[in-house]
Image (cartoon, rainbow, N blue to C red):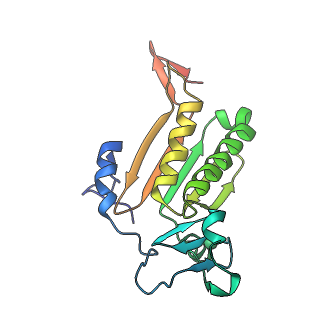
Amino acid sequence: MANKNSFGVPHVRTYDEFREREAFKDPYIKKEGLQEPSICTKCGAVYYKKRWTLDLKTKEKFSEKKFHKTLCPADAKIKDRYFMGVVNISGSLLSDYKQQIMKTIYNEEERAKTKDPLERIVSLMDNKDSIRIETTTDSLALRIGRILSDSFKNEKNPAEYKFRYGDKYVEVDWIYDRKEKVNGRQKKAY
Ligand SMILES: [Zn+2]
């Protein structure tokens, strides 16, 4: 899925270039044919005025019987394990700060979900020395990557942080123990 160049290496681009891709469509967002109001039978999000929301005031406008029952795009993606973003975390930082990193990830999902119920984690795999997070949207993967990078900043040896993508798909690789050669000797970044 990643956009490959002639060498088979995914393109690495900047955040600004990423923003230009906003016009790409999310295949799970289908505005036509979705009746209003609808409710997601999984998470309780409500579809009204062409948007999904967890806002209780919107929900309370209607009696339970009024709602058409469906799955919201986020829960449909989770069911199909369809993800539009990946964050890969590895490196020595994990051995000391895994709990804090996990907490940061879940806090960010909670914050994003409150604003937009379609921003969710599809899966989180803790492989001891690495963590892989799959997200329903590219923007959530991007934000998790940015917030981790900002929270664990090391001015001398910044965490390696890059975007790889093709279409509306982003991969963030965060490796926090780059070894750098200083005066010919190996120096651990962290
Ligand atoms: Zn849902």
In the image, what residue occupies the spot 70% across and 45% down? Answer: 102
Residue 161 x %, y %: 46, 38
Query: Above or below — where is 90 with respect to 54?
Result: above
Is 125 on the left-hand or right-hand side of 161? right
Residue 142 x %, y %: 47, 48
* Viewer-nearest residue: 41 or 165: 41
Residue 97 x %, y %: 71, 34
Is 172 on the left-hand or right-hand side of 115? left
In the image, what residue occupies the spot 57% across and 52% down? Answer: 112
Q: How many marks?
A: 0
For the C terminus, give its image quadrant: top right
Q: Residue furthest left?
A: 6
Q: Residue furthest top?
A: 183
Query: Above or below — where is 156 with respect to 171?
Result: above
Residue 95 x %, y %: 72, 36
- Residue 172 in sight in this render: yes
Instruction: Say which quarter of the image contains residue 61.
Output: bottom right
Instruction: Say which quarter of the image contains residue 45.
Output: bottom right
For the N terminus, give its image quadrant: bottom left
* Viewer-nearest residue: 18 or 87: 18
Q: Quadrant of ligand 1?
A: bottom right
In the image, what residue occupies the spot 67% across and 46% down? Answer: 107
- Residue 14 in sight in this render: no
Instruction: Say which quarter of the image contains residue 53.
Output: bottom right
* Viewer-nearest residue: 153 or 11: 153
In the image, what residue occupies the spot 59% across and 30% down? Answer: 152
